């Protein structure tokens, strides 16, 4: 079985996997990084969102063979202690209900703010529409995004 | 003296032995020898609900299962309140399965706070009372000179203080009081003040373990292909190609089951990782016997509904006066229809099962674990006492995990391999093999007298009952009309509400807000239609039939709910007031109202929705106001989150939620076909609470049912009334 060297959360991991295995299952089944969630496997819900070289990607759509030499950040690496401005904002707004989709929501937000510290409402709307929340916490996600924007522009 | 750690069950036993009385609120499992061991005072556990360690740390065990509704916060707040400890110092854990009374783990119907409010107050008060006695003994003073304050007992004479943690050894040996004094609600310091969710930081750092995240030693991963038609059987499977996929360990078959769960016959691929199992599943070549009921469709179902709607209902639900007396006056009638719906939790169904000899261990999230374990025991022939269930967090439930088909499947698969297996449902499985909210149809008829009074109301509900699936087609418990029709709230002289079941070969289950949601839509829309026909204002018209009416019991059965027209009116008035219903509206702006009671959780809510019509059949939601009365509120922030999320849930159903069936198969196969509300479609919602001193009700479901009728009433005011959900089927679009 092929072997791949991956940079996940600033650590190098070597995994043995078929080259077509999506990054999602590499993270979850092989590296035990279960903060990245499975929701659909077909790029429709955003639960599996991670950051790759600073961009939000659906990890269910990215084959492990294409992830070598990329810098991958998962929710566990956003900050271990919840000190990233996005995590702090989510805490302050008390966003989660079941919480299952929230790692994906936060990774999408973190990647958006990494590229643009002051996204317009239109950019926020179109960016965040990639992530489903069945509990319906969108109002609090919106509130948290604005808290995070304020924090990073201080 | 030999020091011995003792587990919490032993501690309970010692406590009850010392008291010579039974401990309140729970069973003591497996009483063993009665020899009292010497022990180290590590913690004091006066009941199954809580323990205090020697550092003063309080752990509260929650039997109600967390799926996002916030029970892991509201329930420990109740304990902390009566114990007089700082809520932030309380640790919350899932009560291990088996440590509570049968049924106490059951989580559904927005019942958690209602059921647990008094037992948890008692548990907190008992612990506090025992700690106070321990302190009084220590100081050799009267207990009336001692008071609890923030995790300490205070000697009110000399103001000396002892921490709870220092009192646990003495407290553990005291008799458990049979009666305790509960706080006056006016003295509450924690209940009624907003608290952040327990375990929030774990969720935000990815550490929370949902069922899908469980990994046990040696575990393999399974994905299953299921018969596309319910109750079909497997003829043969060619798995040659599937077995060649690297990582595949074994491919197993399992037969389907009948009621209550109707597990479909399946073929499961067991592999070393999920991806290998998913890939191999696609390569299975399976021949199914679909059975005879393989050509049913929702199109035909709604035609059957329509044909039966004008006949006499099979069962009478609620009757008052004599509707036949009103015949001959002005008649208004209309028919409404709502589709099957899937729960579509973002965490797909999953379960971990491990069979070792005659022992079964399980991991996963369930709302009704007793029902699951009892059924699994009889299906698997594994003794109930040999089944260990480890409950986990749920990534959403909404009623889906009241059912346990996925757990039963995991056991059937695990019985065929000597390693633990995690069964994972793909999204397609989740949408196509769900427990659908019954499709339903309503024919309503009203008569008015010569001077414009509403004198009769008839509502014929037709549905595909859940009970036909869980109990079988001979079930008599099919009249799914709790509250809205059985406890019909509008005071009309002559009423006749009835129900007719129609069966179909598709699985059904309970979805958040259940039949109350399905029936509130037609009732609240038709009331508006009558008001329009009588040229009356829909708010005043409703209030004229709700205000100054007495509460009434909805049936003769024990446990029948109380209906309260006054509280239904109260939330309606509040919603209308807050949205500025009486104010002059901007051009092309329209407001729709709807109100109801979520009757068996003693909760009442109304929505007022203001839309702007942009062009015919295209609208924008401009303002949403919700008003709720659920008695005493434990955690206002939790209530707000439920009402905000409940609105999103209701709006999804109003706008686009629909499962369609052809050839007895579900056509939607994921979120592209079965669409959920997205971020850019979520309007802001303002939530207002009625300040109430009534006993607490439940808030998990009350925020859903009035969304669709309020929206449809606004659309009707703008010119065209949609009578089928979702409204996009009537050509509506929105921005």
Image (cartoon, coloured by chain):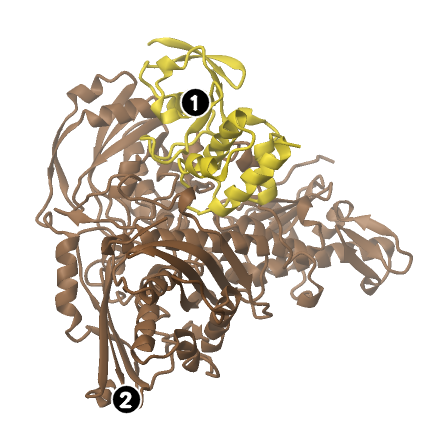
Residue B32 is situated, as x and y percent measured from the top left of the image, at 55, 47
The image quarter in which residue B75 lies: bottom right
| Depth order, front residue of B104/B651 | B651
| x 30%, y 47%: residue | B378
| x 33%, y 26%: residue | B274
Crowding at dot 2, Cα within 10 Å, few <14 / some 14-19 / many 20+, comes out as some
**Which SS class for mark 1?**
helix
| Depth order, front residue of B456/A143 | A143
The image quarter in which residue B7 lies: top right
Residue at the spot of label 1:
A27
Image colour assigned to chain A: yellow
| x 28%, y 21%: residue | B249
State the brown chain.
B
Residue at the spot of label 2:
B449
| Depth order, front residue of B387/A80 | A80
Residue B358, disc: none
Nearer to us of marks 2 and 1 is 2
Instruction: Give the letter of the chain under mark 1.
Output: A
Q: Is residue A152 visible?
A: yes
Residue B558 is situated, as x and y percent measured from the top left of the image, at 40, 74
Residue B480 is situated, as x and y percent measured from the top left of the image, at 30, 65
């Amino acid at each position: 079985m092929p072997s791949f060297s991956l940079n996940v959360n600033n650590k190098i991991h070597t995994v043995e996997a078929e080259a077509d295995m999506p990054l999602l299952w590499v993270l979850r089944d092989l590296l035990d990084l279960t903060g990245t969630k499975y929701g659909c496997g077909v790029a429709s819900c955003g639960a599996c969102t991670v950051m790759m070289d600073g961009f939000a990607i659906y990890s269910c759509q990215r084959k492990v063979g294409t992830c070598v030499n990329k810098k991958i950040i998962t929710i566990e690496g956003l900050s271990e202690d919840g000190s990233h401005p996005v995590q702090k904002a989510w805490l302050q707004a008390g966003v989660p209900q079941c919480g299952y989709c929230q790692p994906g929501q936060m990774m999408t937000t973190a990647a958006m703010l990494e590229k643009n510290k002051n996204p317009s409402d239109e950019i926020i709307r179109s960016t965040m529409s990639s992530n489903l929340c069945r509990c319906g916490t969108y109002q609090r996600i919106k509130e948290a995004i604005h808290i995070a924007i304020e924090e990073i522009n201080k | 003296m030999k020091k011995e750690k003792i587990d919490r069950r032993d501690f309970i036993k010692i406590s009850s032995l010392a008291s010579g009385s039974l401990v309140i609120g729970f069973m003591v499992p497996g009483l063993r020898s009665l020899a009292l061991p010497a022990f180290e005072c590590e913690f004091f556990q006066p009941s199954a609900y809580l323990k205090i360690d020697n550092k003063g740390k309080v752990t509260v065990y929650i039997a109600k299962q967390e799926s996002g509704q916030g029970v892991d916060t509201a329930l420990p707040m109740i304990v902390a309140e009566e114990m007089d400890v700082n809520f932030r110092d309380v640790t919350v854990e899932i009560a291990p399965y088996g440590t509570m009374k049968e049924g106490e783990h059951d989580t559904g119907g927005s019942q958690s706070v209602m059921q647990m409010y008094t037992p948890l107050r008692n548990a907190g008060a008992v612990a506090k009372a025992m700690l106070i006695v321990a302190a009084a003994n220590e100081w050799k003073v009267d207990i009336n000179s001692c008071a609890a304050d923030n995790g300490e007992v205070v000697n009110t004479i000399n103001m000396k203080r002892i921490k709870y943690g220092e009192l646990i050894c003495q407290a553990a040996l005291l008799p458990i009081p049979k009666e305790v004094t509960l706080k006056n609600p006016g003295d509450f310091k924690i209940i009624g003040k907003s608290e952040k969710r327990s375990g929030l930081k774990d969720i935000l750092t990815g550490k929370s373990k949902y069922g899908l995240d469980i990994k046990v030693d040696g575990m393999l991963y399974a994905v299953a292909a299921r018969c596309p038609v319910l109750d079909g059987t497997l003829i043969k499977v060619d798995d040659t190609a599937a077995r060649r996929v690297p990582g595949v360990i074994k491919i197993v078959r399992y037969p389907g089951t009948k009621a209550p769960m109707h597990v479909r016959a399946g073929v499961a691929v067991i592999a070393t990782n999920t991806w290998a199992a998913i890939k191999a599943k696609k390569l299975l070549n399976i021949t199914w016997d679909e059975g005879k009921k393989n050509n049913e469709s929702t199109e035909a179902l709604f035609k059957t509904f329509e044909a039966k709607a004008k006949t006499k209902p099979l069962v009478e639900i609620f009757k008052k006066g004599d509707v036949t007396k009103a015949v001959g006056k002005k008649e208004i009638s209309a028919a409404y229809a709502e589709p099957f719906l899937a729960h579509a939790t973002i965490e797909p169904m999953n379960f971990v099962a491990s069979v070792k000899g005659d022992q079964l261990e399980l991991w996963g999230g369930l709302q009704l674990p007793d029902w699951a374990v009892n059924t699994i025991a009889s299906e698997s022939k594994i003794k109930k006492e040999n089944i260990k269930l480890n409950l986990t967090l749920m990534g959403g439930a909404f009623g889906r995990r009241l059912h346990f088909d996925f757990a039963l499947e995991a056991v059937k698969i695990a019985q065929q391999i000597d390693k633990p297996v995690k069964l994972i449902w793909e999204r397609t499985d989740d949408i196509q093999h769900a427990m659908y909210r019954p499709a339903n149809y309503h024919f309503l008829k009203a008569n008015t007298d010569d001077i414009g009074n509403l004198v009769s109301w008839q509502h014929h509900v037709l549905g595909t009952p859940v009970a036909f699936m869980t109990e079988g087609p001979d079930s008599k418990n099919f009249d799914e009309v709790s509250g809205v029709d059985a406890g019909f709230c509008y005071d009309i002289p002559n009423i006749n509400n009835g129900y007719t079941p129609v069966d179909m070969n598709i699985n059904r289950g309970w979805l958040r807000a259940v039949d109350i949601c399905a029936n509130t839509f037609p009732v609240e829309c038709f009331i508006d239609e009558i008001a329009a026909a009588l040229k009356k204002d829909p708010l005043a018209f409703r209030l004229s039939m709700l205000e100054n009416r007495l509460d009434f019991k909805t049936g003769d059965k024990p446990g029948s709910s109380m209906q309260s027209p006054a509280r239904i009116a109260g939330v309606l008035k509040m919603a209308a007031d807050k949205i500025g219903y009486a104010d002059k509206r901007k051009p092309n702006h329209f407001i729709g109202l709807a109100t109801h009671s979520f009757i068996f959780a003693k909760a009442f809510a109304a929505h007022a929705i203001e839309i702007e019509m942009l062009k015919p059949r295209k609208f924008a939601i401009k303002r949403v106001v919700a008003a709720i009365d659920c008695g005493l509120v434990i955690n206002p922030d939790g209530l707000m989150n439920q009402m905000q999320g409940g609105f999103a849930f209701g709006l999804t159903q109003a706008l686009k939620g629909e499962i369609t069936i052809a050839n007895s198969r579900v056509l939607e196969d994921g979120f592209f076909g079965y669409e959920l509300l997205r971020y850019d479609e979520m309007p802001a919602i303002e939530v207002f609470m009625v300040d109430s001193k009534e006993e607490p009700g439940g808030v998990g479901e009350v925020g859903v049912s009035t969304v669709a009728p309020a929206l449809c009433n606004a659309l009707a005011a703008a010119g065209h009334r949609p009578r089928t959900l979702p409204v996009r089927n009537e050509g509506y679009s929105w921005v």
